[in-house]
Structure formats: structure tokens, C-alpha cells
Image: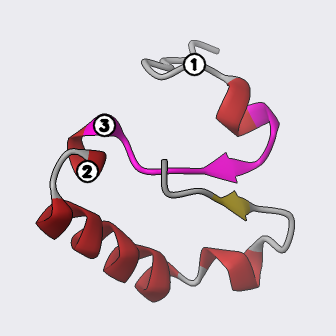
Amino acid sequence: MELFSPYGLEDILNFQVRPTPHFIENEDRMELYQIRLSKKKWQEKWKNLIFKNT
């Protein structure tokens, strides 16, 4: 198995979800990020996920 992790493994191992720098740097993109999170309903599927905005 090969794993590609350009932003590190810490978030994955700690069940954390956060936007990439591309989304953080722009208010409109952050809004899209929030909409995506709502639509995907990840927190309903995986109760242990921790969502961060930074």
C-alpha cells in the first residue's frame, strides 16, 4: 500500500477534518468548504470526527 499525505498524517490519526490552505486563504472558498461538510454529513456517519476551521 502506498500512502500520499501532502499535509501529514496527524489529522488522519487523530480523526480531524480541516480545510487545506487553499480554502483557508479565501473567504468564498471557506464558504464552499462549509457547504460541502454539510452535504456530506460526515459527522452523522463518523461520530468520532473532529472538525476544525484552521
Instruction: Give the position of the N terminus as an image quadrant.
Output: top right
**Between discs 1 and 3, the one toward the N terminus:** 1
In the rendered image of this protein, does residue 13 appear above or below residue 31?
Answer: above
Q: Nearer the viewer, mark 1 or mark 2?
A: 2
Mark 2 and mark 3: Cα distance apart in space: 5 Å
Instruction: Tell me: 14 left or right of 21.
Output: right
- Tell me the mark number nearer the camera, choosing from 1 and 3: 3
Point 22% across, 41% down: residue: 22
- Give neighbour class at mark 1: few <14, some 14-19, many 20+ (Cα, 10 Å): few
What secondary structure is found at the residue carrying circle 2? helix
Q: Is-magenta flag for residue 52?
A: no
Dot 1 or dot 2: first in sequence order is: 1
SS category of the residue bearing label 3? helix
SS of the residue under disc 1: loop
Q: What number of labels is visible?
A: 3
Residue span colored magenta: 13-21
Residue 54 image position (x, y, % from top left): 48, 47
Q: Measuring from the top left, give residue 39's x and y in whole percent.
A: 42, 87
Q: Which residue is mark 1?
A: 8
**Amino acid type, callout 2:** Phe
Q: Amino acid at mark 3?
A: Pro
> Is the Cβ of the residue at disc 2 closer than 8 Å to that at disc 3?
yes
Separation of marks 1 and 2 at Cα, in angstroms? 17 Å
**In-front residue for pair 7/31:** 31
Q: Which residue is mark 3?
A: 21
46 to 17, vertically: above or below: below
Q: Position of residue 16 (x, y in %)?
A: 69, 49
Residue 23: assigned label:
2
